[in-house]
């Protein structure tokens, strides 16, 4: 997990490419409710970090599936559930990828604001493009 500063605030940056994880790190990726992890970050999560086929949301191994394919309102709800989960697991470090900005087709401007509350958690890292949208004060 890289740290950077923007406007005096420490930014926890998710690396743009993740190949390995420390024991307490969790790869957070965009999924679908069916848990069909066939491409993109979902396939990486399945092949390397313990994601389970058929499980579209939650912690599995060192991965956290966050459904992003079922509409923007559902994504907001899933991000809220993830944020609550991260709050309740301060011993884990969550490396959030650009969920929803690949196959799901959303932009960083659409998805990043959903992570505003999570951005205040010391155990959550976000992609640099999400931080650029959030512009912390």
Image (cartoon, helix red, strand yellow):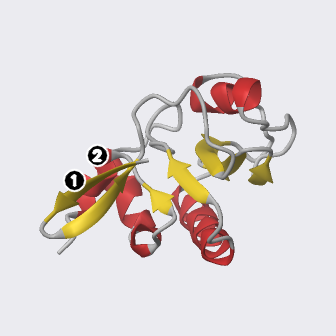
| Label at residue 48 | none
Q: Position of residue 65 (x, y in %)?
A: 69, 48
The quadrant the C terminus occupies is bottom left
Determine whether, in the image, residue 122 is placed left or right of residue 86. left
Are the residues tagged 2 and 1 within 8 Å (C-beta)?
yes
State the residue in front, 99 or 19. Answer: 19
Q: Is residue 47 visible in the rendered structure shown here?
A: yes
- The local secondary structure at tag 1 comes to helix
Q: Residue furthest left?
A: 7
User: On the rendered structure, is 9 left or right of 111?
Assistant: left
**Vertical placement of 57 versus 30: above or below?**
below
Quadrant of residue 74 within the rendered picture: bottom right
| Residue at 38% in and 70% down | 116
Question: Would you call the spot at circle 1 few (<14 residues within 10 Å), some (14-19), or many (20 or more)?
Answer: few
Per the rendering, the mark at residue 132 is 1
Residue at 47%, 33% in the rendered image: 102
**Could one spot residue 37 in this view of the protein?**
no
Mark 2 and mark 1: Cα distance apart in space: 5 Å
x 77%, y 47%: residue? 56
User: Which residue reaches farthest front?
Assistant: 23
Residue of label 2: 129
| Number of marks in picture | 2
Q: Toward the viewer: 93 or 111?
A: 93
| In the image: residue 13, left or right of residue 134 | right
Instruction: Pinpoint residue 32: horizontal percent, then vertical percent.
Output: 70, 43
């Amino acid at each position: 997990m890289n740290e950077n500063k923007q406007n005096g605030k420490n930014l926890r940056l998710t690396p743009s490419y993740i190949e390995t994880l420390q024991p307490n790190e969790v790869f957070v990726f965009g999924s679908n409710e069916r848990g069909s992890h066939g491409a993109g970050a979902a396939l990486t999560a399945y092949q390397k970090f313990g994601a389970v086929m058929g499980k579209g949301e939650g912690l599995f191994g060192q991965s956290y599936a966050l459904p992003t394919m079922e509409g923007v309102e559902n994504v907001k709800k899933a991000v809220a559930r993830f944020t609550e989960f991260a709050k309740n697991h301060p011993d884990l470090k969550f490396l959030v990828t650009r969920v929803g900005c690949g196959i799901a087709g959303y932009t960083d401007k659409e998805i990043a604001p959903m992570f505003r509350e999570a951005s205040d958690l010391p155990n959550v890292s976000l992609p640099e493009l999400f931080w650029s949208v959030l512009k912390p004060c």
